[in-house]
Amino acid sequence: METTKERAARCDRATHARRSSSLPAYGSRTASITRRRRRAKRKALRAATLAAAVLLLGGISVAIFTTPAGSKQETDILPPTNTVGAYIPDTPAPAAESRARAVRFPLTDAERDVVERVVMAEAGGESFEGQMLVAQCILNAAEKRGVEPSEAVVLYSYTKSRPDPTQRVKDAVAAVFDRGETVVDEPILYFYNPALVTSDFHESQIFVIEEGGHRFFAERSTR
């Protein structure tokens, strides 16, 4: 018969694999279940990681290709043109209004000196416009009679005083004769100072403007 000691030794050999570790013996049903559970956990973890990565990439794409409401960002692409670097307005700018005209009566140095001195004598103490008005009367008289300004001042009885002109008088004469500027559009020919004299003749003409101490008139037609 088998002794008690021999049976105990046989039991130890039969259960040695189970006692060598805290885990179930490989090949047992318990070990197989444990491995399947571990593989299932690893698959679930990989699936969760992949899903998180997809969501993250999708969020980045949405942030790049969209803008918040109320902050519209658009770029209008204009059609190409043949003009480069030039601004073409929708409507033309209105022309600037000016009384400037072309030169009407070129002056020689001698004629200029006469006109400047006469204007100085008649309106040296007047405003710039008053000096221009006297120069305009001389110009209109020369054109009307077809004579030089030096002759016109004699025909229209201008003062015989010839003082040296100031720079402002020279500028007024240049504005009228050289640049064609005028103070009024009417062809004024006569003027007088009512504070010094009375003149029924002047007042019988067409009154145009009063500047400083002078009243200026255009000629009334006798026809």
Image (spheres, rainbow, N blue to C red):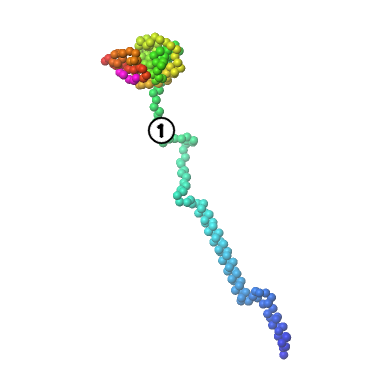
Residue 85 appears at what percent x and percent y?
Answer: 49, 35
Magenta stretch, overall SS: strand
Which residue is farthest bottom?
1
Q: Which amino acid type corresponds to the residue marked 1 in the rendered image?
A: Pro
Residue labelled with disc 1: 92
Q: Nearer the viewer, residue 192 or 86?
A: 192
Q: Nearer the viewer, residue 117 or 136?
A: 117
Q: Let me know if residue 160 is in the magenta part.
A: no
- Residue 85 visible in the current orientation: yes
Q: Residue at x 46, y 48 (%)?
A: 72
Residue 148 appears at what percent x and percent y?
Answer: 39, 12
The magenta-colored residue range is: 206-210
| Circle 1 residues within 10 Å: few <14, some 14–19, many ≥20 | few
Residue 77 appears at what percent x and percent y?
Answer: 47, 43
Residue at disc 1, secondary structure: loop
Look at the picture and state if 19 lies above or below 143.
below
Look at the picture and state if 53 lies above or below 150.
below
- Tell me where residue 119 sits by quadrant: top left
Please indicate whether residue 109 sits to the left or right of residue 27 in the image. left
- Residue 144 visible in the current orientation: no
- Tell me where residue 160 sits by quadrant: top left
Q: Nearer the viewer, residue 3 or 171?
A: 171
Q: Residue at x 55, y 60 (%)?
A: 52
Q: Quadrant of the C terminus?
A: top left
Q: Residue at x 59, y 66 (%)?
A: 42
- Tell me where residue 125 sits by quadrant: top left
Q: Residue at x 44, y 14 (%)?
A: 165
- Numbered circles on residues, count: 1
Which residue is farthest left?
223
Residue 194 appears at what percent x and percent y?
Answer: 33, 15
